[in-house]
Amino acid sequence: MEPIILEDNPHWLNSEVYNSFQRREVLEKAISLLHTKEVLAIIGARRVGKSTVAKLLINELLKDVDAKNIFFINLEKPDFIPYKKDASYLNKLYDAYLKLANPDTKKKIYFFIDEIQIFQNWEVFVKSKYENSNVKFIITGSNSSLLTSNYSTVLTGRVFKLQVHSFSFVEFLKYKKIPYLSSLEQVANKIDISRAKDEYLKWGGYYSVISNSDESIKKEYLKNVAEDIILKDIVPRYNIKNSAAIKDLYFYVISNATTSLNYSTLAKKIGIDAKMIKEYIGHFEDNFLITTVSAYHNKLTQQIKSTKKIYSNDNGFLNLGINRNKNSGNILENMVFTIFNQKGKEITYVKDNYEIDFCVDNDELYQVSYDISEAKTKSRELNAFKHLNPQNHKKNILITYDTNEENDSVKIISLEKFIFECTQ
């Protein structure tokens, strides 16, 4: 056990070990929650960087906290598999840490537990330490239901949740060292920014994807991530018998991202019961593979019952679809969705005689069209706003691949300009 603990805590011997990690946009919010008593739960899909955010928080703590009072353990290690049904083993890990590191227990101990959902009934251990000792818990988990199980209700009111996504476009630009903060920098680096936009549209923001230049490896990595989530998380957690069927469903669903979802039609196409399909899609959403978006309605019950549209939480996964010729408009729309999703916006769509792709925070309308160079296309997209009376909404924006212009009450804007305005 001691070698495992030492392996996970290199900061005890080298306080600069995490200095080279790229800062994430979510970090400032996470830092603000470090010194509260409540458990900080960092949630998000596999491999989006939850562990990196945790280690960036350790780096921040090292400015004021003795290294030995900061304990990190990754429960996904193979060594812990035999104990995952025994939550009392977490106590043994904690006791081994106290014996090995000999921290100052008169001061607060910061206990980081990575992929905590690996252990059943982990909540019982956390609650006991939360109430009876001076321990601040920072936990990470790979499903949104991490804190909704029967056991986790004992932590109700004691947890702050913070979601981590794959790299946003501006984080991608920072990774590629492309300056973008001022209008001058955006003009001076226009070509590099445009190339980065095309790359991000296609491959999304997973670090292991953007840091690899081989496209076949990029696709294989994304496939591995999706299959790991399905086969290692979803299938065992929900006792799913037909793992091949749920995997095939995911690839079908991701092939139809940005479109409306009809469970009955889908059931007939792929031969799975409609009720089961709905459950499976709920599992995909719970594990951050996709997000379903409801149609806007002024009555919440009607909004909940509405036909859902499906979006991938990262554009890279669109490469796993079965369609050989990808629709540029769908790819652009999915990326706009990820921008709103990464910012935690409330997202719906509007469906009447015309359709508006996104209604954000119930007060802003956004339409997405890749190319409006043809008058017919431009007129169709703008008419959707007129039908909904744009004066009734705070914003009316048509997002395109590369067109910027003012048009009456609707602002036509390129994707990168939209992103930069969102970050201001």
Image: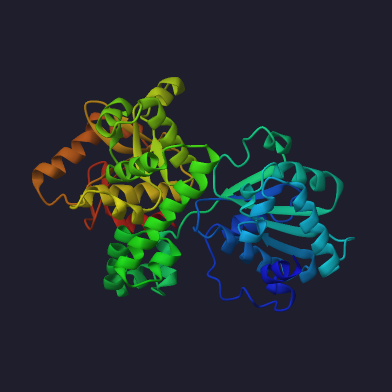
Q: Nearer the viewer, residue 208 or 108?
A: 208
The residue sitting at 67% across, 53% down in the picture is 82
Query: Could you say which is closer to the camera, residue 291 or residue 419?
Result: 291
Residue 189 % position (x, y): 32, 73
Is residue 194 at least partly visible in the picture?
yes
Q: Quadrant of residue 31?
A: bottom right
- Pick the residue in front: 172 or 292: 292
Image quadrant in which you'd find residue 65: bottom right
x and y, in percent, of residue 73 in the image: 68, 61
Q: Quick check: can you spot residue 257?
A: no
In-front residue for pair 261/36: 261
Pick the quarter of the image with the C terminus: bottom left
Q: Position of residue 278 (x, y in %)?
A: 40, 30
Residue 265 horizontal side relative to residue 151, left or right: left
| Coloring applied to the structure | rainbow
**297 sits to left or right of 64:** left
Q: Across the whole image, how many numbered discs are drawn on residues?
A: 0
**36 up-or-down from 346: above or below:** below
Residue at the (47%, 37%) spot, across then down: 240
